[in-house]
Image: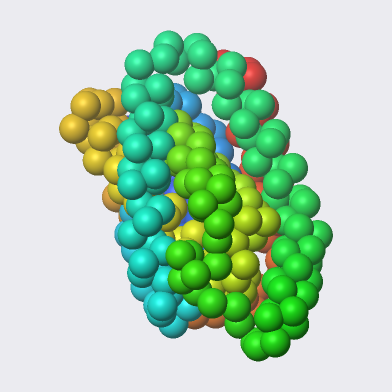
Amino acid sequence: MEPILGMELWQIALIVLAGIGAGGINAVVGSGTLITFPALVAFGVPPVVSTMSNAVGLIPGNIASSFGYREELRGQWRRILGFVPASLLGSLTGAYLLLHLPEDAFETIVPVLLVVALIMVVGQPALSRYLKNRSLRRAERAGREHVAASVGDTLSTGRYLAVLLVVFLTAIYGGYFAAAQGIILIALLGLLLPDDLQRLNGLKNVLVLVVNTVSASTYIIVGHDRISWIAVICIAVGSLIGGYFGARIGRKFSPVLLRTIIVILGLVAIWRILAL
């Protein structure tokens, strides 16, 4: 069978499936890049090209998952508008580093980032339990089910600046290499913001959407010749489907199975990059 833009039909089908999985996982916990990035690398797409193509392709899934959490986003728009500039600047910084650092530097740094991401994925259940219990204790102390959503009403200036710094640094990471940025971001937001974990997950989805949109736009404008457009189309179609259904029914999936798949694929990606 004739390849389509350098890929066999079965490879295209598997990348679409990877996109569906990534879109669904991103909606629920984050780290979907740890499915699509290894898939692209396994099929011979260079690591930097894989990262850029993956960032562009996951945008539809990010939009779908953010829309799926619209109920949790109610009352948070003041907060979101306050954090978006930090996400924008951080994402631009990360995209600049990806485009201007040597490719061998990326191949050296990314295995380390993948290990960090996999540790976050494995530790996510315990961290989520801790954050949930912490949120409940805060709510009990406040004497109501949910604490106030307005940043200005609940945070001191110092803590607000700390949240901005966290959002900025996480956006740099996301602009350079997006794997598990959602898990990292929600973990840090949960430690700093007094709010329900599901509401923070909705906030995380929007901020990740901002980061990926800015970095993907930068890649298209500056490095469009280094993007695999067939990979973009496959991931975009898959992530749109996965993001929509992930936000609706993703919480019914087995977290253990999802994490097992992510860890296996992450280890495959590390092996492939080290073998280059």
Q: In which quarter of the image is the C terminus?
A: top right
Q: Position of residue 48 (x, y in %)?
A: 42, 26
Q: Position of residue 33 (x, y in %)?
A: 52, 46
Residue 133 appears anywhere in the view: yes
Q: Position of residue 5 (x, y in %)?
A: 27, 36
Among the 4 quarters of the image, the one containing residue 100 = top left
Among the 4 quarters of the image, the one containing residue 74 = bottom left
Please identify the residue farthest to the left as the structure is shown: 221
Residue ID at (42%, 71%): 76
Among the 4 quarters of the image, the one containing residue 226 = top left
Residue ID at (64%, 79%): 252
Residue ID at (67%, 56%): 191
Please identify the residue farthest to the bottom as the structure is shown: 144
Is residue 180 shown above or below 190?
Answer: above
Q: How many labels does the image show?
A: 0
- Along the viewing direction, whichever of 251 and 69 lies nearer the viewer: 69
| Left or right relative to 52: residue 120 | right
Is residue 249 shown above or below 41?
Answer: below
Q: Where is residue 215 in the image (x, y as percent from the top left)?
A: 33, 39
| Left or right relative to 132: residue 82 | left
Residue ID at (36%, 69%): 77
Is residue 154 shown above or below 89?
Answer: below
Q: Quadrant of the N terminus?
A: top left
Residue 35 appears anywhere in the view: no
